[in-house]
Amino acid sequence: MVKINDFNFKGKKAIVRVDFNVPLDENGKITDDTRIRGALPTLKKILADGGSLIIMSHMGKPKGKVSAKLSLGQITDAVAAALGTAVKFAPDCAKAADAAAALKPGDVLLLENLRFYPEEEGKPVGIEKDDPNYDAAKKEMKAKQKEFAKTLASYADVYVMDAFGTAHRSHASTAVIADYFDANSKMLGLLMEKEVQAVDNILSNIKRPFTAIMGGSKVSTKIGIIENLMDKVDNLILCGGMTYTFAKAQGGNVGNSICEEDKLDLALDVMKKAKEKGVNLVLGTDSVVTNAFDFDTMSLKPGAQVKVCPSNAIENGFEGLDAGPESQKKFAAAIKGAKTILWNGPAGVFECDDFTAGSKAIANAIADATKEGAFSLIGGGDSVACINKFGLADKVSYISTGGGALLEAIEGKVLPGVKAILG
């Protein structure tokens, strides 16, 4: 495998897959440029060597249709400012050959949103899976996807994959394109190298004790990760909305709290497996509850009551929205002294200041453990938002840029975007 730092891009055209799927306000201005900043080391390395850049990314989910609100043309000036050099824009990914050919060393070309083209994702458009013609349509689209990837590849001498956030997708720009470059002309970018190493630290290079914190609303969406972690962790904290599925599974009353009624047996099975494997499973025992919350505005409704009660004794009309004081202490105790820490998913509705205490307790405990020498990996949009909200981003070891990609990697799945480079 070619390492990007060992490669000289002088006189080369490099096409780089980045993740510039940045949030925009109603005026098309970027509200968080974290993803752009994350790609800069790779992009600047290529330019510093004397290479030219062709940058490609997606934005949002246009589903193969052109949308002015999702055009990457809106961020051209921001990318230019971040790179410190002019950036040209190609309004059609599939017809950028002339613009790419005209690039001189030091030039930068940003391609339009890849997902304006259904060939990028390679999914048939306008036909459902139960349609008898679906398989034929899928085969036809896969052939078109290869042609699209071949067109993108034709613009450059070298391919660099630096978009960990989409590495779990077998798209034209994240995986298929690599087929059109030999082993010495494709590589992971600096951000991807760091992401792959961070996951390896969590899954392979474990220093014990290892504590994983899994939050979020549903057991069902995290079960694959939970089961994979069971064979690796010493402590497993399950918090957030999952708390109430576990509480009800054990015969508790959870009031109006989120609860997967069809996953009660699954919750009991998780508890059983943890006991069998000697894993210290930590569940919240008390919750901060309310009887009037508006999820649209993420705020309490007028006259709302907020109180603390046992997680298994929540009266009807109330719902749990954060971990209570006793749960916070339990979580912190399981994190204290850990040498490897993984956090994915908040402990509550942290977007509202009335329900941030649980997530903040976890974040503070992770920061303290990191200071004592632990390797801490924070991943998933909400967990990253938590760390940033509490001003602790520089107090943890690594913040992953990938949500779904990180989860699939932790689940033990091979990421197509990584496999395309490493084989």
Image (cartoon, grey):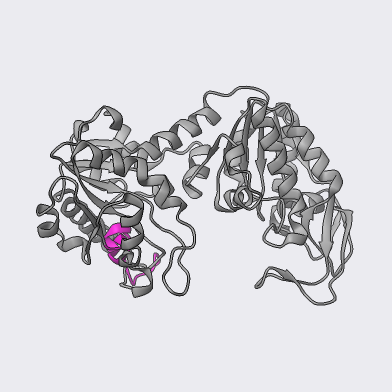
Relative placement, left or right, of 251 versus 128 is: right
In the rendered view, tell whether residue 234 sits above or below residue 298.
above
Q: Nearer the viewer, residue 227 or 157?
A: 157
Magenta highlight: main SS: loop
Relative placement, left or right, of 195 versus 96 is: right
- The residue shown at (78%, 43%) is 283
In the picture, which quadrant includes the N terminus?
top left
Magenta extent: 112-130
Q: Nearer the viewer, residue 258 or 124?
A: 258
In the rendered view, tell whether residue 2 sits above or below residue 288.
above
Q: Position of residue 49 (x, y in %)?
A: 21, 36
Q: Position of residue 139 (x, y in %)?
A: 25, 57
Q: Nearer the viewer, residue 40 or 144?
A: 40
Quarter assignment of residue 254: bottom right
- The residue shown at (53%, 23%) is 205
Q: Position of residue 310 (x, y in %)?
A: 89, 52
- The residue shown at (72%, 48%) is 360
Residue 247 falls within the magenta-colored stretch: no
In the rendered view, tell whether residue 327 sits above or below residue 341.
below
Residue 126 falls within the magenta-colored stretch: yes
Instruction: State whether residue 395 appears in this view.
Output: yes
In the picture, which quadrant includes the C terminus?
top left
Relative placement, left or right, of 120 versus 191 is: left
Q: Nearer the viewer, residue 58 or 262?
A: 58
Q: Position of residue 92 (x, y in %)?
A: 21, 65
Q: How many marks?
A: 0
Relative placement, left or right, of 127 versus 35 is: left
Instruction: State whether residue 168 appears in this view.
Output: no
- The residue shown at (48%, 70%) is 25
